[in-house]
Image: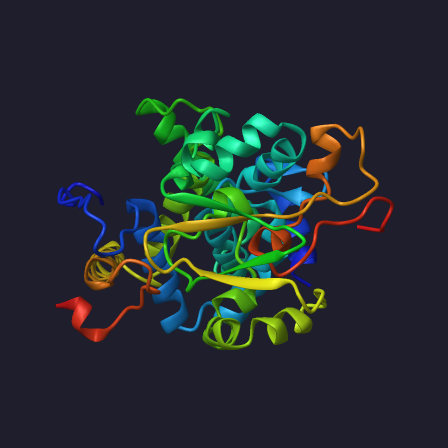
């Protein structure tokens, strides 16, 4: 069914879906319209696998940045290029900007759900991330949104909100948890949660139940 | 509940790529394709043995046509099986599937980069 689709656009002023994504969406729409699938039930199944989708490069990238200063410097300078050197197959690499959390500044990313959500890095977006209220509130009241997620920051920590609706996507580099001196990259990667890379959470702390 | 459904599916279709906890997916669309099959099975559109046979046919056909059979294309076969069964069971013809596919393509084309893509009546043109 793909023979007539020969007008692939490579400019970036509009969205693009792969041939496969088009077929999946077509099927899903028809089955929903005919009452064979409930969107909510489908979402529930998919969300059950949100941590099982994609290669989850993000945690590995963060763990490497925690242990390898040269890599971290390169990563903050040009995220796409630095991640490219790791040899990940990664179309997410395009226009990826990595922003670093420090005691002085906490970064948080908002985005409408679009075809370029960096799922290769982060897995599936959480349900709340797709909701319009999250995005508008995050811009107006980031501290309040973070509080809802149980993220309490010192009063004098600046919160910076990055909107990835344009061509640029953001990955937050969270602060390395205390008590992880001497840990391997693999051990550290286990601590890196999706939410910590969106900025709505912290990495797990050593010894805490997962 | 969905994990019980999935467990039944992986028991019936041992070829589903899994880790220790259950199915794993290479991309979000694969999870969508998996979830649709689960839902259709639950609605009684097909039985798992029926699905397994259709999927095996699809894979055999693809291999005959030169599919590398490395596992990377597993869910492409899965999707083709879904489309085939949906058509065969009279849920939606291949023609309808194609019409919706084109409508989604149109919707993507007119949606500015970064906005959610939504299907509208005019996309069916």
Q: Locate residue A152 relative to residue A171 in the image: left or right.
A: right
Residue visible at 12% across and 68% down in the picture: B125
Can residue A145 be seen from the camera position used here?
yes
Picture coordinates of residue A128, whole percent (x, y): 55, 68
Where is residue A90, by image quadrant?
Answer: top left
User: Which residue is depicted at the point 25% across and 54% down?
Assistant: B94
Q: In the rendering, at what x and y percent does residue A14 appear? A: 22, 56
Say which residue appears at 62% left-offset and 76% top-offset.
A144
Q: Is residue A160 above or below residue A61?
A: below
As displayed, is residue A187 above or below residue A105? above
Indicate the position of residue A24 as horizontal and vertical percent values: 37, 53
Residue found at x 31% / y 64%: B117
Residue A139, percent from left and from top: 48, 72
- Asked whether A164 or B102 is in front, the reply is A164
In the rendered view, does A34 fall on the left or right side of A82? left
Query: Would you say A172 lies left or right of B73 here?
Result: right
Residue nearest the viewer, comparing B82 with A18: A18
Of residues A117 and B7, the one drawn nearer to the viewer in this rendering: A117
- Please name the colour scheme applied to the rendered image: rainbow
- What count of labels does the image hold? 0
Front residue (pair A172, B51) = A172
- Relative to A115, say whether B74 is above or below: above
In the picture, which quadrant includes the N terminus of chain A? Answer: top left
Question: Quarter of the image holding residue A57?
Answer: top right
State the residue lying farthest toward the right. A207
Residue B43 is at least partly visible in this image: no
């Amino acid at each position: 069914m793909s023979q007539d689709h020969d007008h692939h656009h490579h400019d970036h002023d509009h969205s693009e879906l792969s041939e496969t994504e088009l077929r999946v969406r077509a099927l899903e729409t028809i089955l929903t319209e005919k009452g064979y699938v409930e969107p909510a039930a489908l979402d529930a199944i998919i969300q059950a696998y949100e941590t099982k989708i994609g290669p989850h490069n993000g945690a590995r990238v963060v763990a490497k940045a925690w242990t390898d200063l040269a890599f971290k410097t390169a990563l903050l300078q040009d995220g796409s290029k630095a991640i490219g050197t790791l040899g990940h197959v990664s179309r997410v690499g395009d226009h990826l900007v990595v922003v670093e959390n420090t005691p002085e500044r906490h970064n948080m990313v908002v985005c409408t759900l679009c075809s370029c959500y960096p799922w290769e890095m982060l897995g599936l977006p959480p349900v709340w991330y797709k909701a319009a209220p999250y995005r508008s509130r995050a811009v107006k009241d980031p501290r309040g949104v973070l509080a809802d997620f149980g993220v309490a920051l010192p009063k004098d920590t600046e919160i910076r909100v990055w909107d990835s609706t344009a061509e640029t996507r953001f990955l937050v580099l969270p602060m390395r948890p205390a008590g992880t001196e001497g840990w391997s990259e693999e051990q550290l990667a286990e601590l890196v949660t999706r939410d910590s890379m969106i900025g709505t959470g912290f990495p797990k702390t050593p010894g805490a139940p997962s | 509940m969905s994990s019980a459904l999935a467990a039944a599916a992986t028991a019936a279709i041992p070829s589903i790529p899994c880790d220790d906890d259950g199915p794993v997916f290479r991309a979000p669309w694969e999870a969508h394709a998996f979830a649709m099959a689960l839902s259709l099975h639950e609605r009684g559109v097909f039985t798992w043995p029926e699905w397994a046979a259709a999927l095996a046919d699809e894979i055999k056909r693809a291999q005959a046509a030169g599919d590398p059979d490395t596992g990377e294309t597993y869910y492409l076969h899965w999707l083709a099986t879904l489309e085939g069964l949906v058509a065969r069971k009279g849920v939606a013809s291949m023609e309808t599937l194609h019409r919706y596919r084109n409508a989604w393509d149109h919707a993507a084309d007119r949606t500015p980069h970064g906005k959610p893509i939504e299907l509208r009546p005019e996309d069916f043109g």
